[in-house]
Image (spheres, grey):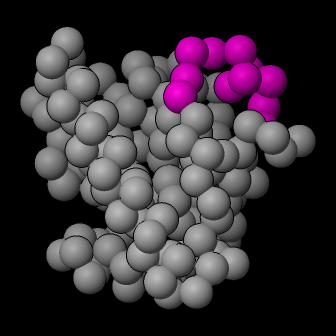
């Protein structure tokens, strides 16, 4: 049985997509990551693709997508990137067990700031993988 880590941000255009890509590049056996947004953008942030390419990865093969009750329910681990303070964050997500990484939206940052967010996501994903394999 495959278990799912769900990464959630507002637009599913940068932070959660990068987390999904980084996690799936070295997912522990029996795990996979998905991502979704509370208000998905039409397209991924082009800098997200560029920043992932710098570390040898690509964006997931899907456009930004909507967070649905089904995605929440089928996930074993839920991680928000900092959308809990937004009105668009569904009540259902707020009442489930989750972890909030509270990372800034890199869209408003310069490239160095974007890289910092990417690197922090990478660090936290590596820590999450270790936690999942220890259980």
Q: Quadrant of the N terminus?
A: top left
Relative side of 38 to 17, left or right? right
Count numbered badges in the picture.
0
Q: Is residue 129 magenta?
A: no
Query: Which residue: 49% across, 42% down?
Result: 7
Q: Position of residue 19 (x, y in %)?
A: 39, 53
Query: Which residue: 38% across, 85% down?
Result: 50
Give the magenta range. Answer: 89-99
Q: Is residue 91 magenta?
A: yes
- Residue found at the very far left of the displayed protein: 29
Q: Position of residue 129 (x, y in %)?
A: 22, 35
Question: Which is more toward the observer, 53 or 99?
Answer: 99
**Residue 48 in sight in this render:** no
Relative side of 27 to 54, left or right? left
**Residue 135, quarter of the rendered image:** top left
| 18 versus 74 height, above or below | below
Q: Position of residue 115 (x, y in %)?
A: 42, 75
Relative side of 85 to 5, left or right? right
């Amino acid at each position: 049985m495959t278990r799912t880590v769900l990464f959630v941000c507002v637009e599913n255009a940068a932070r959660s997509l990068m987390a999904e890509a980084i996690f799936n590049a070295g997912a522990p056996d029996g795990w996979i990551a998905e991502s979704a947004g509370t208000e998905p953008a039409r397209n991924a942030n082009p800098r997200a693709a560029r920043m992932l390419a710098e570390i040898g990865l690509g964006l997931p093969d899907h456009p930004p997508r909507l967070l649905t009750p089904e995605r929440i329910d089928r996930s074993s681990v839920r991680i928000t990137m900092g959308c809990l303070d937004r009105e668009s964050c569904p009540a259902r997500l707020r009442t489930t067990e989750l972890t909030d990484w509270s990372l800034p939206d890199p869209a408003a940052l310069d490239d160095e700031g974007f890289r910092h967010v990417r690197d922090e996501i990478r660090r936290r994903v590596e820590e999450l993988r270790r936690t999942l394999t220890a259980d």
